[in-house]
Image (cartoon, coloured by chain):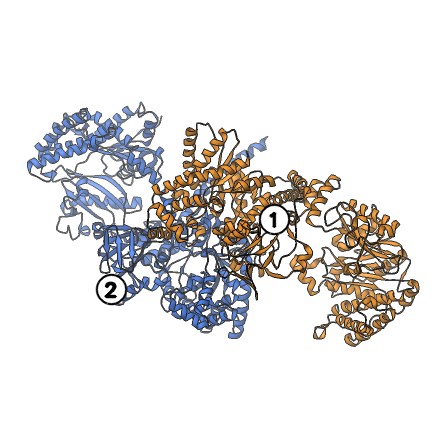
Chain colours: A orange, B blue
Amino acid sequence: MPKYVYLFGGGKADGNGSMRNLLGGKGANLAEMAGNKDLKLPVPPGFTITTEVCTYYYEHKKTYPKELKKDVETAMAKTEKIMGKKFGDPKNPLLVSVRSGARSSMPGMMETILNVGLTSKTIPGLIEKTNNPRFVYDAYRRLIMMYSDVVMEKAAGIEPKDDEGIRKQLERIMADRKKEKGVTSDTDLDADDLKYLAQAFKDRIKEVLQKDFPDDAYAQLWGAISAVFASWNGKRAIAYRKIEGIPDAWGTAVNVQAMAFGNMGQDCATGVAFSRNPGNGDPHFYGEYLVNAQGEDVVAGIRTPAPINSSSKSEHNKGEETLEEFMPKIYKELFAIQKKLEKHYHDMQDIEFTIENGKLWMLQCRNGKRNGPAAVRMAVDMVKEKLITKEEAVMRVTPSQLDELLHPVIEKASEQAATILAKGLPAGPGAACGTIAFSSEDAINANAEGKKVILVREETNPEDVEGMRAAAAVLTARGGMTSHAALVARGWGKCCIVGCAAVHVNSEEKTLKIGDKTFGVNDWLTLNGTKGIVYEGKLQMADASENAVLAEFLKICDKVRILKIRANADTAADAKKAKEFGAEGIGLFRTEHMFYGENSEKPLFALRKMIISNTTDERKAALDELFPFVKAAIKEAVEAMDGFPVTIRFLDPPLHEFIPREQSAKEEVAKSLGISIEEFDKRAEKLHETNPMMGHRGVRLGITYPEITEMQARAIFELSAELLKAGKKVVPEIMIPVTCCKEELVNQKAIIDRVYKEVLKAQNIKKISYSYGTMIEIPRAALLADQMAEVAEFFSFGTNDLTQLSFGFSRDDVGSFLKDYQEKKIIDFDPFQTIDAAGVGKLVDIGVKLGRGARPGMKIGICGEHGGDPKSIEFCHNVGMTYVSCSPFRIPIARLSAAQAAVNSAKNQKTAAKKVKAPAKTAVKVKAKTKKK
Amino acid sequence: MPKYVYLFGGGKADGNGSMRNLLGGKGANLAEMAGNKDLKLPVPPGFTITTEVCTYYYEHKKTYPKELKKDVETAMAKTEKIMGKKFGDPKNPLLVSVRSGARSSMPGMMETILNVGLTSKTIPGLIEKTNNPRFVYDAYRRLIMMYSDVVMEKAAGIEPKDDEGIRKQLERIMADRKKEKGVTSDTDLDADDLKYLAQAFKDRIKEVLQKDFPDDAYAQLWGAISAVFASWNGKRAIAYRKIEGIPDAWGTAVNVQAMAFGNMGQDCATGVAFSRNPGNGDPHFYGEYLVNAQGEDVVAGIRTPAPINSSSKSEHNKGEETLEEFMPKIYKELFAIQKKLEKHYHDMQDIEFTIENGKLWMLQCRNGKRNGPAAVRMAVDMVKEKLITKEEAVMRVTPSQLDELLHPVIEKASEQAATILAKGLPAGPGAACGTIAFSSEDAINANAEGKKVILVREETNPEDVEGMRAAAAVLTARGGMTSHAALVARGWGKCCIVGCAAVHVNSEEKTLKIGDKTFGVNDWLTLNGTKGIVYEGKLQMADASENAVLAEFLKICDKVRILKIRANADTAADAKKAKEFGAEGIGLFRTEHMFYGENSEKPLFALRKMIISNTTDERKAALDELFPFVKAAIKEAVEAMDGFPVTIRFLDPPLHEFIPREQSAKEEVAKSLGISIEEFDKRAEKLHETNPMMGHRGVRLGITYPEITEMQARAIFELSAELLKAGKKVVPEIMIPVTCCKEELVNQKAIIDRVYKEVLKAQNIKKISYSYGTMIEIPRAALLADQMAEVAEFFSFGTNDLTQLSFGFSRDDVGSFLKDYQEKKIIDFDPFQTIDAAGVGKLVDIGVKLGRGARPGMKIGICGEHGGDPKSIEFCHNVGMTYVSCSPFRIPIARLSAAQAAVNSAKNQKTAAKKVKAPAKTAVKVKAKTKKK
């Protein structure tokens, strides 16, 4: 026969903290606090009815096991004994709370009933005992309100008329009474009022629900227990479990616990405290309390709580007497308890306590929530204090908590009070405010005048890049998480919201419509790029400036992680920033980025000439013009990385992307090539593509125009030679994009090898240590990675394109249906943000295995957007990659995520190893048997 | 010591037909004819020097094994004995031919020297023996010409001056002599002329090559042997081997064989014959011969050869005396030999014979080449005659031979004489001629007037469909094998050439420029769509009309094949045609095809309204309008298939494809929706996509607009119910396109299930046997096919899209670089024409295995363009598909290819089984050993 009821309290407990599945989270924690030999804390005694009873209850038409009644009565007797009170006793009555408690926290989803045991029989005794009739009648009317709502209506399955439940009706009666008395607050009602209300409540209940309010303690108790079990299958709870993926079969436990009252007089109090400051990580005991109050009063904020000690003082409460001053003995006891708890749980504790007539009761303890800076500080401090290991420390900070330290944020209160205008996709984290700029030019001008602006566009294109750089933030009406705006902004760590469909931009009239509001150039907006929310007006910013502890924390991460971290960087400035953030190389240098933004005029002109060229000679002439720019740009980045490897990707985008649209620019290029504008248009038209993403780009350009490959190779080898001669270390890695077969790599390598030899000879040096590799971004390349690896010395997975092709989702167009997919739960994540481990990940896994099969120990990385996403980084670790490469601003996140991945995978391997051992034994046994025969 | 020289002749042979690797094809065949106990044919005796000698020769600095000289002399002695003549003998000299003969035929790539053994010593004896000085001197001057060219110049590695080789010089001397004598033909030169020429030749050789022409029989023989071995590494031969993939290491054999002369008088003759008519398959002995002539005279066509018998008579030669009449005894002997050979080789034989002074010599026999109709007829006949099995029969006809029977072709002579204007991609097979139509409208009008036209366009789009149907053929300047024009034309079995870059169309001026020629509406063109050639003018057509034997042959194929064959058909007419061609169902009914071409006006209008709708209500109203058309179109096709399954693919293309471009059409739609033209344009603009191939299409439409799915489901269930009630059998299969995850299938199924129940109720019937499946055309769907198969009851691989996405090749844009890829040998086939077994095929294989793993025995097919391609069909068979589906006109090819695939795979399995057995044995041995220990 299973044990259905577990006692706790009085320095003992039947259960312990590890029994969450059976006792629920709350029950297990209460047992741990009460019974653990290192703790034995003053927990109000009581007992837990297990989750198995819940399961039984639902499997047996909502009935209980026979034994339960006796078990509960026995447990109640023991609780009574500890408390020296008796449940339902007229003279010295025990009151209890009845609370749910599932395996996994489901906050607010299930029911709680307090003050169970108050009846016409016990009320007089309690009044006599407490000498506080107001307290008793207040407790009674609370019990009636809760009980009638939860037990008599909801659990009984009664559908209220006109959608007005019993609770609302009782609240109206109470409001009427206050009106009659001419008061506004509940606390202004006196004992008589409350007594009157209790009777009025019971009358109304009888009238509406056709039942008497139970006046027997045990009747109340069983009603409450059943109501808690019933609430497991309440609509809200079922919906919540569906979303959180909690199995229906788990069931809830029920905790019945002696009530402790902090509101029985001036020797009573209640409070909430943390073993360290959850707002900044300061390692001092921190908390608030209220004299003569109940827990809910602290939460409700009607009275201002006082600090428990001097380190908890703030602007608001510094005048109040601290608990340390007010009840020094109890404070000392509490201080010792929180120290003990932190040591026991190896983490900052969030505790609730009540002081009833000078006695301290611990109501709850749990690992405390904290913000980003606090999480980082605690992790670092606790390692120093040897409270936790490095591996534990890296698991204590979530990537989004770390992110808080890296970007300015909106001041909390300011954000809570603000009006949400619209929601879009959170493309670039952080926050920013500014007036509106409707064009790149306006943004640049405003910036020059020292004004903060938010660039608002339908969508951005390469011509907007300068304006984006000048703006404090970017907001677009269209585009997804990997649209142009999102990619560029994220690359700069700039606040950005994209795909904000509610936004209607009229660039010509310089107006912005959201709903029925219209904004102009002088109006302020504030963007929360971390959440994708647009606010009206100028909100206050909190600058989460550089945290000194952050560097220390990331060094801990570095010691734990196995994955290397590189940066996607296209300029010397980016490269320097990446190094500061801790990059161990550049994983993606995009040659084409020198054609966007600052100083791009001349190289872009040469590129355009090259694109519009019609013969190899024309093209070669244009490439000669382009050559010095390409060489200089790469050289600066290589130099900035100072001996770290730099992966240079050869020209990738389809050429028509760079064709000018303005007449003047067209004419200039036409003139320089000595052709008519008609001829220009004709050549440009020929380059048009129906599906440019799958068109003439990447290596395909190098196959058709070997001279383009040659120019790039020459630039890399010449600059390497020059740096080597200047005594510098260079580690260039040549990366060919968009490959789908080995022969492409062979073809391009022949060109590169030839140029290599030519440069060595011309520069009179012996060797440049470079390597030759490829992007794996086309499904076929992943499927035939063994062949690719015969030529490529390294792989870099381009999971942006790989995701596009694996799903057949065009990044530029997916906005039109991905939302529907997410709303209808067809895909529950954005595969361009987090790698699709099941599908795309399968291709990556195939690619890694085949590649390493052909070339053992091969260097393999990732350089798509996923390289900066925590879940994707974990995937990269698990699949055995050498490194991830991400935008410089994501590097701290990547360092953390890589460390967490290492810890998780070590844990999983241990678990797996354990699982494997058992069957192995069985196999041996079987063999042995066979032998005997 | 290996045996280097193999004798044949005199009713015996050292080798046999199976020794191709050692003796080469020719040597092995000569040995078989001479030595096989069932044949023992009169082959001029001789010997074969093995390919191993060739290998030795190249591995030992062009020297021979020591023993060879003696072996050759011994073999020559035996040859002399059989012939009763002696090599180099002044009185009764033996002459020999020296010929190459590799394992695999390399026609014309290596050297042959005839009449070896003629010297100043042997000439007088031969004149005396033959009493024919002209014959002898003619043979001598031929020997000198061949020998000086092949042995003394080419094999010696002498580079001729001014690119004029010795052969050309000798030919000039001969031409001068003819001029002097005032004659035009070689045969007009008499013995003295030839004697004079022989001397003049030798003088010139001495002068130019600084060497005497060898006057010793054995010196000539060894020179000739070495020259043949040397020719294995001639430039032409090396190039040929590279193209054909013949290993350099194979080497050639050398055949030395007694000369037999058909030109020694009126009791001599030479001829070529076939055991059946290679032009039509008629099962009668068929051939030609010439009295007093050499083999090359038959080939050269100077004299008209006579028929060997009455069944070989034609318009040209019916007046000539047949061999049967002229030499009845020899004819009888020859007739018996060809019968024997056909029976021996189980195939039609191509034989060469010579009659020397009344004696028949067999010079060669091999399996005869034949055209398509002949191949089919022979295969059918030989099965009936029990000469071959059904499995052998299906291997006797190549798919392209079968194709000859299915399309009109250009009359052979007419084509050979015609001027090639341009070449393009052979998109639709067959041939056609017509004047030029520059627009769809013109084509329709011309067709109405009964004129044949060829529609010539830059490229086609859906608006051209009517014109394409009206035209006899289609020619486009742009597009690849799966461009719009190619797909539509192939679907109709219409002659079509696409991507013909040399063609410059000016639709407004109605002119067509090719090179420097300009054509207008009255000019004729002829297209060979099988080869992709455009000819000038109106060529004569040969109608390869329905061959009665074809049906019989295809029935043989049906008995052998395992794959089912279905058709891609979108109309009742297509469905009927498909059934006639032998389709066992429709594998792809494209719902959207009712919006193209004939009678598309009304449904297209309703569709456009639906597309431009902005609200669900607008859209539902438009769908209600569309519903009857969709239902009617599907119903007709289902009815036409008469109980065979019909797979109906739900709406697939991106909606913006159907947005009208003409102002009037736009206005009409706008008006019907009650919106302004500006609003129309705005809505249309919103539908624009950057990469439409990966945009909002297929199931993605059904997810966003469930009402579209609902309408289609309702149409299918209603029409099925109606047909069922009318006592018909229906097997509808609902196929969802462009899926990438299981949840899409779940989502759509819920809609379809609901509609199903509604229709059953409304129609008051119990059940419609339908199945629910999906296209697998997105890589992710293939990778997660196990999950897909949990919902889908069948798969149909859409390898067009799967190829696009696996390669990242946009079909519409690949033309800009695929040619470079093919020219540079990066990809040596068009993956849209033949499935890429290595890459795309891997995905298909994964998909099939995972799908069947989750749903054993699952029905799996293919419905892309590959379904009609022989190599791809073989792949589909090997991967274990249930069926292939292709355009109706490709069905015969598919039936044949499926049968061939079945035969090949059975063969391969046998081979594999053999290979596996051997190692297994070894393993057993190892075990046994271990036991002993």
Residue B473 can be seen in this image: yes
Q: Secondary structure at mark 2?
A: loop
When asked about the image quadrant of residue A63, the answer is bottom right
Count neighbours of disc 2 (C-alpha within 10 A) and say few if under 14, some if 14 to 19, many if 20 or more: some
Residue at coordinates 25% horizontally, 46% vertically from top-left?
Answer: B339
Q: Position of residue A483 (x, y in %)?
A: 52, 53
Residue receiving disc 1: A871
Q: Position of residue B146 (x, y in %)?
A: 20, 32
Q: Chain of mark 1?
A: A
Identify residue type, mark 2: Lys
Do badges 1 and 2 share one subunit?
no
Which label number is shown at residue B612?
none
Residue receiving disc 2: B451
| Relative depth, front residue between A679 and A172 | A679
Residue B728 lies left or right of residue B115; in this view the side is right
When asked about the image quadrant of residue B504, the answer is bottom left
Above or below A497: residue B715 = below
Count neighbours of disc 1 (C-alpha within 10 A) and say few if under 14, some if 14 to 19, many if 20 or more: many
Residue A76 lies left or right of residue A407; in this view the side is right
